[in-house]
Image: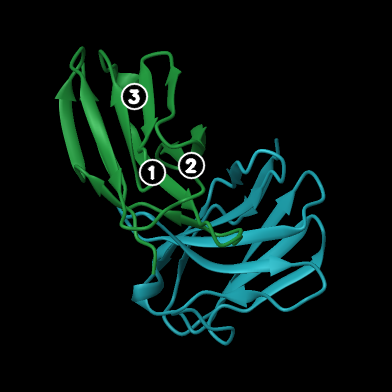
Amino acid sequence: TQLLEQSPQFLSIQEGENLTVYCNSSSVFSSLQWYRQEPGEGPVLLVTVVTGGEVKKLKRLTFQFGDARKDSSLHITAAQPGDTGLYLCAGAGTSGTYKYIFGTGTRLKVLA
Amino acid sequence: SAVISQKPSRDICQRGTSLTIQCQVDSQVTMMFWYRQQPGQSLTLIATANQGSEATYESGFVIDKFPISRPNLTFSTLTVSNMSPEDSSIYLCSVEDGNTGELFFGEGSRLTVL
């Protein structure tokens, strides 16, 4: 069974601080996605990474896919209250399955 | 992109009753997915619904408890049967963009079972 463990589980920081969220697995994924979910809403895609070692930037967010495609990280620079939410990584298997495995989630709160 | 509407957005139900959640997509899609999100937790896939065939259930989920219909390419329903307080969750409908792999989600249906 493929599992995606995220750390930390909870994070409360002050506005302006930097943070990194990790998504780890013992399994290889063909691609990995990061979603953000706000209360009362469904998750919304932030980015998809496909190639091992790939780095993608989305404004203050930097995403990296591990060289072995088993792990990923999300780094937020100068966090803002609008970054508050539940961050979820989701991996697509390599066996051709269409199913996405969601990580355990990281709940971020950025205080003004 | 896809716009997904779910009904109801929330409901409070009595133990032993059943509730059907509806999911409407603004475009035709081959597969629709139903997820459960327990309070403060991540998403767990319940089943995949293809039009014209029986839904495929994930380990731990059975058709008798979560019957699914998929009458056409834009609509699906999930029924939560014989509910207990452990079924209190957010249930999310989702579709995939076949080109990008992006998942689009409805806003979810928050069920509370008393």
From the viewer's perspective, is residue B15 above or below residue A107? below
Q: Are marks 1 and 3 on the same chain?
A: yes
From the viewer's perspective, is residue A61 above or below residue B28? above
Residue A53 appears at what percent x and percent y?
A: 39, 32
Q: Which residue is mark 2?
A: A43
Residue A58 figure quarter: top left
Measure how far apart labels 2 and 1 are at the Cα level: 8 Å
Question: Viewer-proximal residue, B40 or A90?
Answer: A90
Question: Viewer-proximal residue, B57 or B23?
Answer: B57
* Chain that the image shows in cyan: B
Colour displayed for chain A in the image of the structure: green
Residue B74 is left or right of residue A50, and the answer is right
The reply to whether discs 2 and 1 touch (Cβ–Cβ < 8 Å) is yes
From the viewer's perspective, is residue A104 above or below residue A69? below
Residue A19 appears at what percent x and percent y?
A: 21, 25
Question: Which chain is indicated by disc 2?
Answer: A
Q: Given the image, on which type of amino acid does mark 2 rest?
A: Pro
Display colour scheme: by chain
Residue B84 appears at what percent x and percent y?
A: 39, 79
Residue B88 figure quarter: bottom left
Task: Look at 59% across and 47% down and name the residue there.
Answer: B106
Local crowd size for mark 1, using a 10 Å CA cut-off: few (<14), some (14–19), many (≥20): many
Q: Quadrant of the C terminus of chain B?
A: bottom left
Residue B110 is left or right of residue A96, and the answer is left
Q: Given the image, on which type of amino acid does mark 1 rest?
A: Leu
Question: Which chain is indicated by disc 3?
Answer: A
Q: Are marks 3 and 2 on the same chain?
A: yes
Q: Which residue is mark 1?
A: A88
The reply to whether discs 3 and 2 touch (Cβ–Cβ < 8 Å) is no
Q: Residue A83 — which label?
A: 3
